[in-house]
Image: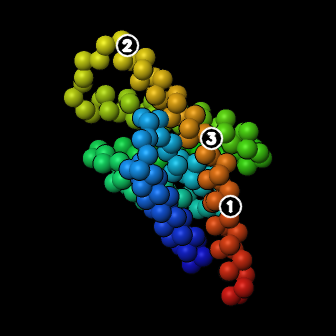
Amino acid sequence: MEGTANSVVLVVTGFFVLVIQSGLATVYSVPAFAPNLMLPVVIMLGVSQEVPMVRGATVSFLLGYLLDGFSGNLMSLQTFILVATFMLARVAGLRLFLRGPAFQIALTFGVALVTGGAILALQAIFAEPPNIPLEETWSQAAVLCATAASTAVFAPLMFRGVNAIDSIMSRRREETA
C-alpha cells in the first residue's frame, strides 16, 4: 500500500510540475530546448532498488502520458520513451548515479541525448518524412543538444524532489505503524 501512495504522490507532483512548466511557457517566451523534467524522475525510479519493476513502469507510463498530453503529442512518443528509459535504467542498475550532482548531470545529459535521438528516429519512421535541408539537420542537432543540457541542469533539483517525497512518505508510514 505504501508504494501506491508514493506512486500517486509522484504522479500528482509530476502533473503540477508540468502545469508550472506550461504556465511559465505561456508567460515567457520559451525556446525550443525546454527541459524534459520527467526524465530525471524516471531515471531516479529506474536506479532505485526500492521501486518494484511494475510500480516504476506504471509511474513512468503515467508521467509520459501526462507529458504527451501537455505537449500535444498524438503519437505517445514520450510515454514509450519514458517507460523504455525506466527499463534501461533498471537493467543498467547504476548505483553510482546517486553519488553526486556532477554524475547526475552527466548521466542525465547522456540519457537525454539518447532519448531525444530515439524520438527523432521514431518520428522519422512513423511520420511523413519531411524534406529537410542539411542546414536544418544541424540546427535540429543543436536543439537536441541544448534540450539535453537544459534537462541535465535541472536533474539534481528533480532528484532532490523525488528523494524528499520518498523520505516524507517513509516518515508518514513509520508514524502510522
Q: Quadrant of the N terminus?
A: bottom right
Whether residue 54 is visible, yes or no, is: no
Q: From the top left corner, tell me how far across and down residue 51 is, in percent.
A: 61, 61
The amino acid type found where label 3 is placed reads: Val
For disc 1, the neighbor class at 10 Å (few under 14, some 14 to 19, many from 20) is some
Label 1–label 3 contact, CB within 8 A: no
Lower sequence index among marks 1 and 3: 3
Lower sequence index among marks 1 and 2: 2
Q: Quadrant of the C terminus?
A: bottom right
| Residue identified by numbered label 1 | 163
State left or right for residue 109 relative to residue 129.
right
Residue at 30% across, 48% down: 72
Label 2–label 3 contact, CB within 8 A: no
Whether residue 148 is visible, yes or no, is: yes
| Residue identified by numbered label 3 | 153
Residue at 61% across, 45% down: 154
State left or right for residue 30 relative to residue 146.
left
The amino acid type found where label 1 is placed reads: Asn
For disc 3, the neighbor class at 10 Å (few under 14, some 14 to 19, many from 20) is some
Lower sequence index among marks 2 and 3: 2
The amino acid type found where label 2 is placed reads: Glu
| Residue identified by numbered label 2 | 135
Toward the viewer: 24 or 47?
Answer: 24
- Disc 3 element: helix
Outermost residue toward the bottom in this view: 176
Q: From the top left corner, tell me how far across and down residue 7 is, in percent.
A: 53, 67
Q: From the top left corner, tell me how far across and down residue 173 is, in percent.
A: 67, 80
For disc 2, the neighbor class at 10 Å (few under 14, some 14 to 19, many from 20) is few
